[in-house]
Structure formats: structure tokens, C-alpha cells
Image: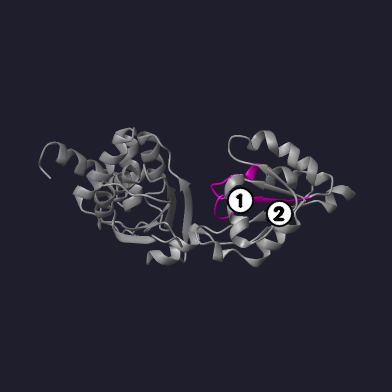
Amino acid sequence: MNSSAAEGVLVLAGTPIGDPADAPPRLVTELAGADVVAAEDTRRLRRLAQALQVEIGGRVVSYFEGNEAGRTPELVEALLGGARVVLVTDAGMPSVSDPGYRLVAAAVEHGIRVTAVPGPSAVLTALALSGLPVDRFCFEGFLPRKAGERAARLREVAADRRTLVYFEAPHRIADALAAMAEVFGSERRAAVCRELTKTYEEVRRGPLGELAQWAADGVRGEITVVVEGAPEPGPGDLEPAELVRRVAAREAAGERRKEAIAAVAAEAGVPKREVFDAVVAAKHGTA
């Protein structure tokens, strides 16, 4: 590590997910003392600074998905020159489903110190409010937009025992919940957390099937979905109809029947023959 790299510091600064009053005191200090502030949306940064009554003394540059790859070398150069660069996104912690990963990776590669200002997290806030187990969880980010890819991604974690957390856009939430109900089962418990810490905060809890019906009428705002993990199956616990439903869901998403039967058998802890017989019986109407 050279001497200039030792002087430069990259600060990942968490920002409020809704209420500006949730901003950590250190955020004000970092914004005031930064040489460069890289912001996902410079206009939102200005509004936040105004709400916090802080004057940003350094240079402000945009850093978002569209220019992240091109601007990273410029910021690394500033860091190597000894600058204190503060990275902020629209809400929450940079690089968590937001811009930042490329810059952190590049800084680490060049031996530049990286630190953080911890701040509010939509993931942890939604987990705490969901009423679901939080001792083990997995953050899955945003689901794919295309139906087939979305179903395939959900199938990958259908048997996961951990609580699952997703971000979702309001115009896709109905389709996402419907897909979850199809793959995970309509009775799997979940919570839809909307506009966290904002004026119209809402947490809707219930089975995925009911939540999908509720969302069909339209949902607005920033959304985080928390889904209960898969139950611990015991041999023979699942009814034949449920085994058939799971195989059908996998087939509908593009999986071959043989592989779907094997996967469902592994999930349920039963012999593949039992799943095969249930599928055949359902096909011939003898189940």
C-alpha cells in the first residue's frame, strides 16, 4: 500500500429509509467534511442535506447504476490522491441492492481503506416488524422481472428454512406475491412492509395467497416483503396433492418432470417413487 492510498478513505454512509430524523449524527459530520460526495441522486442528497441542516463543502458527483462503471475509476483516482469520498444512495446502505459494490471492490483492490456510517435498514426493519422468525434469514434482493426467471429463482429457495426478505417495485408486487404463493404455497406466512418509517407506513401480514389477492388491486410505495421459511418436513407429512402441486409448479417454470419429481422428493424427505405415484394418480384422476 502506498502512502497516498493510506490517506484516502471511502465512507459508505447509510441514509434514512424514510424519516430524515433517523439519520445518524455521523452522517452530518461526514457530509460536511467530505472532499467528494458520490450520490445516487444528487437532488435527493440536496434535500436530505437541507433537512439535516448541513452544508456539503466538498464536490458532489452522481453515482448511479447508469454511470457506476464509468465513474468508479475517477473516484478511485481521487481516493488514491488522499481524498475522503463519501458514498450515499437514495435510502439505506450503499451496495445493498444499490450502487456501491464496484467502488468498494475497486477500493479494496487498490489497498484503500473502506469504512461505514451505519444507518437505517429496510431489511432489518421489515424483519423486526414482520412477526416472523428472525434468528436466521436470507436477503434475496429484487426478483427477476420475467415470469419464468422469477419462478426459477423462487424455486431455488422454496425449501430454505430461513426467513426470506425481498425488495419489490409497486408495479410488480402483485405478480411477485402470486408467484410466491404458487411456488411456496398459498398458506406460507408473509408480511408486506410498505413505506417504512414514512407517513403512510403499513405492514400487511397473512398467508401469501391472501396477500396476493390484496395486492391485485394495486399497492404504492417502497416495498419490502418478508416470507416465512419452509417448514421442517417429516417423512410422509405432505399430502399427495401438495406433492403434485409442487411438481406442477416446477414444470410450469420450465423444469423437466423427472428433475421436478426428484427435487420435490428431496424437499419433502420422501422416496421419489412416492412423488411419481402421486403425479401419475393425479393425471389419471385416481388420487
Quadrant position of the C terminus in the picture: top left
User: Where's residue 227, x and y in %?
Assistant: 37, 56
Q: Say above or below: 115 vs 148.
A: below
Q: Amino acid at mark 1?
A: Leu
Mark 2, Cα crowd under 10 Å, few <14 / some 14-19 / many 20+, is many
Residue that badge 2 annotates = 56
Q: Amino acid at mark 2?
A: Ile
Tell me what residue is drawn at x 12 percent, y 36 percent. Answer: 284
Q: Main secondary structure of the magenta part?
A: loop
Q: Are marks 2 and 1 in contact (CB under 8 Å)?
A: yes
Write down the region rendered in magenta.
Answer: 84-102
Could you say whether the residue bearing mark 1 is in a helix, strand or loop?
A: helix
Residue that badge 1 annotates = 45
User: Where's residue 228, x and y in %?
Assistant: 36, 59
Tell me what residue is drawn at x 39 percent, y 64 percent. Answer: 130
Res. 14 visible in picture: no
Q: Say above or below: 160 vs 148.
A: below
Q: Is residue 15 left or right of residue 262?
A: right
The answer to which of 265 and 31 lies nearer the viewer is: 31
Q: Is residue 114 left or right of residue 236?
A: right
Tell me what residue is drawn at x 74 percent, y 42 percent. Answer: 75
The answer to which of 10 and 1 lies nearer the viewer is: 10
